[in-house]
Image (cartoon, grey):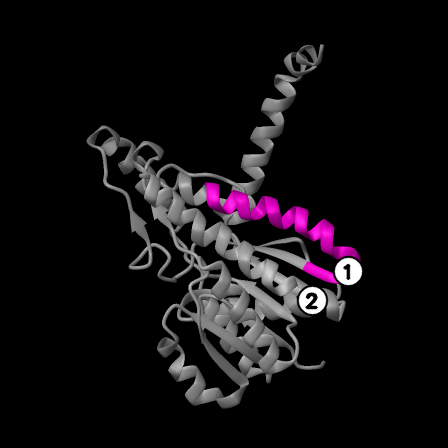
Amino acid sequence: MASKVWFITGTSRGFGREWAIAALDRGDRVAATARNASSLDDLVAKYGDAVLPLTLDVTDRDASFETVRKAHHHFGRLDVVVNNAGYGQFGMIEEISEAEARAQFETNVFGALWVTQAALPYLREQGSGHLIQVSSIGGISAFANIGIYNASKWALEGFSQALAQEVAPLGIHVTLVEPAAYDTDWAGTSAAHATPLPAYDGVRELAAASRAKRQASRGNPEASRSAILRVVDAAKPPLRVFFGSAPLAIATADYESRLAEWNEWQPISEAAQG
């Protein structure tokens, strides 16, 4: 199999770093981006010219286009573009400030959109390529105290599903990776927390207990290395794929509940048509 050229955002930690290592270990080349490129020094020291470290804040549209251009110019092509940069915003919907809501969407939605738009002309010219959009089980379900995070991932899911239909005839694949809880820093120092309102203290406790139950068995980020390679090497890659064992049960219960409710209210839906 011919080696691939990857462009990965948010490579300083988490899935971005693990997938960069997976690609580099097998002889692929990686344009690795981070807000602070010095966090990639160890990758450069180990893999040399196979990795191109680039500074990028994905919320800067012009910088996203220029950074993708640099990567393409350096390696001559792009095969796998991974929109991994993102963070979790904790807070009840009433607690979220305008600045916090906008910042969440600027990174999780618009950041992915800018990199996607920047890469597409090169992928179209090649007639090939694979866009990996890092979503979440929270991108198809929703949970108290992370509603704005959920909203951002639902938006990512929506534009990516439409995108997949638009670019399939051009030879380009799109995959939404929907992980469960992993031992990454998603809920740690990289997360943001809204100022709490005492009125929600009880709800917050229930949400924390529910989250702890969902995350009782966290995934090992290193195990995702082989999984992502199987996805990008597939002749017919999936539009959506869960990472971790827990999401399927969550999704099944959620969608069964939706279908039951829609069916229950179908007579009202039909009456509303007129």
Q: Which mark is residue 170?
A: 1
Q: Which mark is residue 123?
A: 2
The magenta stretch is: 151-173
Q: Is the residue 65 above or below the residue 145 in the image? A: below
- The amino acid beneath tag 1 is Leu
Tell me which numbered mark, 2 or 1, is placed earlier along the sequence: 2
Q: Is the residue 230 above or below the residue 161 in the image? A: below
Q: Main secondary structure of the magenta part?
A: helix
Q: How crowded is the residue under tag 1: few (<14 C-alpha within 10 Å), some, or many (20+)?
A: some
Q: Which mark is residue 181?
A: none
The quarter of the picture where the N terminus appears is bottom right
Taking depth in this image into account, of 20 and 37 the one nearest to the observer is 37
Residue 138 in view, yes or no: yes
Identify the residue at image location x=23%, y=38%: 196
Q: Is residue 162 magenta?
A: yes
| For the residues bearing labels 2 and 1, Cβ distance under 8 angstroms | yes
Q: Give percent across and percent down for residue 17.
A: 45, 72
Residue 243 in view, yes or no: no
Q: How crowded is the residue under tag 2: few (<14 C-alpha within 10 Å), some, or many (20+)?
A: many
Q: Give percent across and percent down for residue 76.
A: 65, 80
